[in-house]
Amino acid sequence: MKNMNSTIKKLAGLIFGLGLLAGCAAEQQEVRKFYWPQLPERPRIEWKKAYSSQLDFPRSGFKAFVSAIAGTEDPILFSKPVDIKSNGEGKVYVSDPMAGVVYVYDMVEGTVHLLGGEDAVGQFKNPVGLTLDGSLNIYVSDQEKLMILVFDRNEKPLRAIPLQGVLGRPTGMAFDKQRNRLYVVDIKDHRIGVFSPEGTLLSTIGKRGDEDGDLNFPTAVAVNSKGEIIVADSMNARIQIFDAEGKFLRKFGRRGDGPSDFQIVKGVAVDSDDNIYVTEGKGHKMLIFSTNGDFLLLVGGLYSVLGSGKAAPGGFLIPQGIDIDKNDTIYVVDQLNKRFQVFQYLSDRYLQANPVPGYTPPKQ
């Protein structure tokens, strides 16, 4: 009993000591903020964090104590992530075709698991595109299986949509929640497939070419608040916009190495103000345009974090998929850095509710 009491006292002292150390660290640590444009200009984008594994979640309280006693757990690392989607309620899905899985980052619980649970390994062969419908069902395009696998919001399998003989090579996807339509990019046949949620092909948009409405190896698709279809027309180095019925409306972009130019377009997304975000792979950057194609902002630049131990906010090594959820939180796959980065779009509404120290809004 005497030895047990001694052990308990030592353990309590260790817990108390760890608490003191954590408290001192919290007091001394200065959290630096990163904005684009930089203060004192009106900030539009704020960098929040980067995630390479479950170890990037903050550890506090009992979790921190357990880590200190037991040692650091093995990280669950990405192989070659491609696409990303957030359900806006705390779960972020990341496809990794090289690993043959879809990772689920639970931002509330601070954990990482596989979509489909323990039986997920082998469930996919080449998962690439991701999207969510209005019920938060998850759609995953599998290029090798030539199908779309659908899971409910609790990650239970719902159905499979076969694409053999329908599309050549499914890639990026988007869901029009107002019209209940699923858009699937067919990179091989240079078009967009329009489907019902159950998988009935309703129509297609585009064919190979470089004229208005033509596509050349499209990679991604997004839908804005008007139901307009925004397509990353990768090898034509442009963004094309169609109406909800697939009629060509407008385009923007050109090939080049200037700040607003494209070389290899990878992903596309829209925020709550219908601004258009484009990830540019070869240029290692995220570009932001108005809904009409006016260039607004550049975020990024070439930076390899592997082996450096640095966070490198906004530094990319081939950015790929991009998503903006209902909270205007931006998620970008930073592929060869084997991570994803999280940003926040600072809309007027957001800034009003979350003032930025160092920025004074102009008087009305």
Image (cartoon, rainbow, N blue to C red):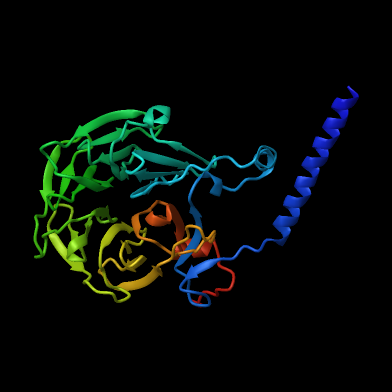
* Front residue of this view, candidates 257 and 293: 257
* Front residue of this view, candidates 6 and 142: 6
Q: At which x and y percent is residue 39?
A: 52, 75
Residue sitting at the far front: 307
State whether residue 95 is above or below residue 115: below
Q: Residue at x 35, y 60 (%)?
A: 318
Can residue 328 be seen at all in this image of the molecule?
no
* Front residue of this view, candidates 65 and 153: 65
Q: Residue at x 25, y 54 (%)?
A: 220
Q: Residue at x 37, y 40 (%)?
A: 102
Quadrant in the picture for the N terminus: top right
Q: At which x and y percent is residue 139?
A: 30, 39
Can residue 298 be seen at all in this image of the molecule?
yes
Left or right of 120? Residue 195 is: left
Left or right of 272? Residue 109 is: right
Q: At which x and y percent is residue 305?
A: 48, 60
State whether residue 34 is above or below residue 94: below
Left or right of 279? Residue 103 is: right
